[in-house]
Image (tube, helix red, strand yellow):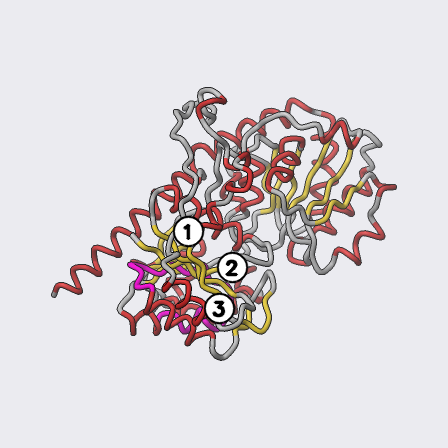
Amino acid sequence: MHIAWLGKKSPFCGNVTYGREITNALLDRDYQVSFLHFSQSQNSYEHHREYQQHHHRWLERPRRPHSRINEMTGLPQTSSEITPPYNDGACSDRWSNCHEIPLPFIYKSQVYTIPTLKSSKVLLRSLAQLKPDLVHASLTLSPLDFLLPDICEELDIPVVATFHPPFDSKIRNLKSSTQYLTYQLYAPFLARYDRVIVFSEIQRELLIKLGVPGDRVVIIPNGVDECKYSPGYSSLKYQLRAKKLFVYQGRIAAEKNIEALLKAWKIVNLGDDCQLLIVGDGPIRSSLQPHYGKEHNITWLGFVADEVQRIDILRAADVFILPSLVEGLSISLLEAMSCGVACLATDAGADGEVLQDGAGVVLDTQGVTAQLKILLPLFHNHPEMTNLLGNKARQRVLERYTLRQNITKLERLYSEIANKQLIINNQ
């Protein structure tokens, strides 16, 4: 099956990770994938035609050997049975082997994208020439999101959307927020997609209330590669001279509520043998960093592009903290859980659902600083608690949130839609 994937490759955000992981997994399962994304490349359609004419339609990609997975740990039976993707060297990312089509844009950020006026024409002509079996759009909060159903209807191609906007898990709070306006704005257009993928029942219920047909809204949670993101040795704590390492990883933005964590950390003062590592970048970093620095045992690492280094950080962590006010379903949280890290996260988006029933500590989105003032010393003083929650977090990922499970559900959805389209075309 040929999937045309419409999404983002930059700047780095959860949407980018989502697209990379799923398209890589689809390639591993022998799907043909064409990746359409916003790029400043000139003459994109002409470049696409030249690319086609020279027959460079598909590149060979490295194959991961099959391995037997231990049912209890989720790890390969022996280290020789699998080649981890992050050790593949230059070939580690099968994403680079997708057939890429650049779409012109005026501006793009981690949150939204403004395409050029001709981008819809480039998209239409590219899809007409590619003739994919299905289009899957990882919605980028751009005007093209609204035009895509019309484009695909004109070309007689079924289209699936993944709807990412963050939300508060409490409907009352959500309805009073700007996120609710996003859901209201998108609902009439989402109703025209063949299927809409969301991450939780709360999202599904809300979209149905806003007019999206219930049979078109499907819950497929984010997934993580449990073999790649796994418990293991890291020397990072030794390098930082820390006995306990607490980690935040994500955007440094207001909705992530990082200052609540920083305030609590500064107040409790756990001592020089404890470090708080802030991994990521964003618009409010420059205003926060001068007030919460080395003198408070806080290290600002900035954005880490290298996946091996990010895994090394998570393997060194004792506690992962996500104090967000709104979320979708945090991939960073799932990655930390998969690495066996004890996790604390607010009940924002689907994150509380992920940690419920003992897989981690769920915080209320209100009064995060006060809650962390109590919890941080507990995790510092009781290592057995971090070990127990780390093991439970890992087990929760293996049960519900592996990338393999995610892709299998996606394959079933693709097959269902493709078969329905075939029946319609034969009538």
Label 2: how many Cα within 10 Å (few below 14, some 14–19, many 20+): many
Q: Is residue 325 left or right of residue 287?
A: left
Q: In terms of sequence position, does the residue under pointer 2 or pointer 1 come before the other? A: 2
Three-letter amino acid code at the position of disc 3: Leu
Which of discs 2 and 1 lies nearer the camera? The answer is: 2
Q: Nearer the viewer, residue 409 or 129?
A: 129
Q: Is label 1 in a helix, a strand or a loop?
A: helix
State how far apart marks 2 and 1 are (Cα).
25 Å
Residue at the (49%, 43%) spot, across then down: 353
Single out the residue that lies furthest toward the right. 295
Q: Disc 2 marks which residue? A: 8
Q: Disc 1 marks which residue? A: 201
Vertical arrangement, residue 316 with respect to residue 408, above or below: above
Q: Is label 3 in a helix, a strand or a loop?
A: strand
Q: Is residue 421 visible in the rendered structure shown here?
A: yes
> What is the magenta range?
130-149
Q: In terms of sequence position, does the residue under pointer 3 or pointer 1 come before the other? A: 3
Q: Position of residue 266 (x, y in %)?
A: 82, 43
Q: Is residue 390 left or right of residue 247?
A: left
Q: Disc 3 marks which residue? A: 103
Residue at the (75%, 55%) spot, across then down: 285
Q: Which mark is residue 59?
A: none
Single out the residue that lies furthest toward the bottom. 117
| Residues under numbered marks 2 and 3 in contact, where contact means CB atoms less than 8 Å apart | no
Three-letter amino acid code at the position of disc 1: Glu
Q: In terms of sequence position, does the residue under pointer 2 or pointer 3 come before the other? A: 2
Residue at the (41%, 63%) spot, across then down: 51
Which of discs 2 and 3 lies nearer the camera? The answer is: 3
Q: Position of residue 22 (x, y in %)?
A: 43, 48
Q: Nearer the viewer, residue 11 or 61?
A: 61
Three-letter amino acid code at the position of disc 2: Lys
Q: Is label 2 in a helix, a strand or a loop?
A: loop
